[in-house]
Amino acid sequence: MTGASRGIGRAVALALAGSGAKVVVNYASSSNAAVSNGTLFSNPRPFKRLERKLKLLQKRVSKKRIGSSNRRKAQAKVSKLHEQIANLRKNYHWELAHNLCDWAGMIFVEDLNLKGLAKGMLGKHCLDAGWGQFFQILEQCCFKRGVYFQKVDSKKTSQICPNCLTETGKKTLAERVHSCPNCGYTTDRDVAAAQVVRLRGLAAVGHTVKMLSEGKFVGIPLKKESLSL
């Protein structure tokens, strides 16, 4: 099924868990990605799960004599485990990307400063989730499967109600639920952020289509096959 046959009505926006916060980011959230339809995808965190084993192997390396064959063997085990972690992460990212492409004809993601996030106080969790790699894989998967992909502004995605567009203010790490004081709309905070991303993405696509119809130059690359309605 191509992106065109799915149509704009089934566009999905992806917001990384906790990524809407500007100052403090909840990398330790139980979910890796939130989708605008309410779906939460778990983060297997391969590094965290195998970190204890990795530390043990690295400790064994440090105890071996430098230049010895035993040290080289121990280092080889460390390298093999690093490779295992990387493969687990990459396989999960491809699986998640294909799952999203199965459902949606259009995918929008937050345009995050991933390098800046990785330098934060919980940067290790950010690196373990591999968000940068996932975005690259997701974009590749969308291209291959005819699904429209675009990044949108990430500012205040967790501070705006997707139902009435009221700015509700910053949320603390303990606030996992979005509850709008203006309209009463309630949902998971990451799902609410994804819904805001979806609105911004659809608005950007609508503006682009309008400019194309008027014969104006558009700087955003378009996949015409996924936008033919």
Image (tube, rainbow, N blue to C red):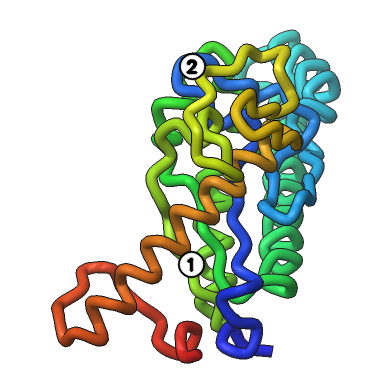
Residue at image point 25% right, 86% down: 213
Q: Secondary structure at mark 1?
A: strand
> Toward the viewer: 88 or 182?
182
Q: Residue furthest front?
A: 183
Instruction: Give the number of callouts.
Output: 2
Residue 223 locus on image (x, y percent)? 41, 82
Q: Earlier in the sequence, mark 1 or mark 2?
A: 2
> Mark 1 — residue?
149
Residue at image point 56% right, 87% down: 4
**Looking at the picture, does residue 194 appear above or below residue 21?**
below
> Toward the viewer: 168 or 92?
168
> Mark 2 — residue?
120
Residue at image point 74% right, 23% down: 176
The amino acid pointed to by label 1 is Phe
Left or right side of 80 for 130 = left
Residue at image point 51% right, 65% down: 139
Q: Quadrant of the N terminus?
A: bottom right
| Residues at circles 1 and 2 in contact by the CB criterion of under 8 Å | no
Q: Quadrant of residue 141?
A: bottom right
